[in-house]
Image (cartoon, rainbow, N blue to C red):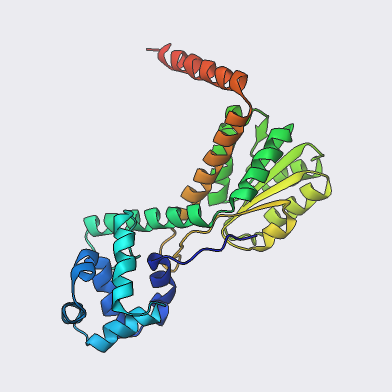
Amino acid sequence: MAVEHTPTLMERLTEARGSLRASERKVAQLVADNPAFVMNGTMAAVAEAAGVSEPTVMRFCTGLGYSGFQQFKIVLAQSLALGIPATLSGIDRDDTVPDIATKVFDHTISSLDRVRRFLDQSRVEEAVDAILAATSMDLVGLGASALIALDAEQKAPLFGIPCSAPTDPHQQYMAATMARPGTVTLVISNIGRTQSVNEVARMARANGATVIAISGDETPVLEHADIPLVVKTIEDTDTFTPTVSRLAGLVVIDVLATAVALRRGAEHLERLSAMKEGLARFRRAGE
């Protein structure tokens, strides 16, 4: 079940970008380049700076769902006060390296904030409980999602159970056919339509495993999941392949691993601390 939330200014601008008129895109670009000026300026000043008419500025604001220019400025001010970039400005061919860095960081920060607000925390609780009750965990992903699965495998000491992240689809399928009650199969697929991943999730569930699925939206892989986790980012894959969905998946894995480790109690945390200290000594042994 998705968590309902009011779209942020960032999300509304992103969703409306393709439908904006050329004149309205000039206003959007001004908001991206100089949000403080727009927040403090009059409609006339904004119109002049963007090279458009005042009615265009008003149409831009109402087209995003706001009652007018003043409400748009209030929401913009709230976004800036929270430290969240107000808009996603597309990367242009003429951008300098500092421009690109700013836009990529702004995109990432805003997108991770969206994940945080959208994530169904009750489902996260269910996932934590399932891992606590499990005897082992299989981690499944292909491509970029495989990197998230491998990171989760590295956190096996936090989870406190054996974790396996085979990268070969045949090995993933074999693990699914051998799954039993007590196994958690954590499936990661941002697009959620990869045939082999969906088949692995289906097979694991048919054999009694508890399937947790992390996906970027209400995708087909969630149909095979006992516990669906929708990790909804702001993606733009027309030209570039962003890492935002990977970062979001890694953060969700961190949330699960940290929550499980804490719920396992003081003895488990003491063993983790001893492991960390031993690892530090092991690293220094060759110095």
Q: Nearer the viewer, residue 93 or 213?
A: 213
- Total numbered badges shown on the rendered structure: 0
Residue at 39%, 57% (x, y): give it: 110
Residue 159 in view of the camera: yes
Find residue 212 and report its horizontal and vertical position in percent: 68, 48
* Front residue (pair 38, 91): 38
Q: Residue 209's quadrant in the figure?
A: top right
Nearer the observer, 171 or 243: 243
Can residue 89 be seen at all in this image of the molecule? no
**Which quadrant would residue 191 be assigned to in this image?**
bottom right
Residue 23 location in percent, x, y?
28, 84
**Quadrant holding the C terminus:** top left
Expressed as whole percent of the image width and height from the top left, the position of residue 172 reads 70, 45
Residue at image location 55% in from the left, 34% down from the top = 258
Vertical arrangement, residue 176 with respect to residue 87, above or below: above
Q: Residue at x 19, y 76 (%)?
A: 42
Question: In this rendering, is residue 33 above or below 224?
Answer: below
In the image, residue 174 sits, relative to residue 229, either above or below, namely above
Q: Quadrant of the N terminus?
A: bottom right
- Horizontally, residue 151 falls left or right of residue 112, namely right
**On the rendered structure, is 95 left or right of 280?**
left
Decide: is 129 above or below 193.
above
Determine the image quadrant of residue 184. top right
Is residue 204 rendered to the left or right of residue 138?
A: right
What's the residue at 24%, 59% (across, down)?
99
Tell me residue 49's x, y (percent). Answer: 16, 77
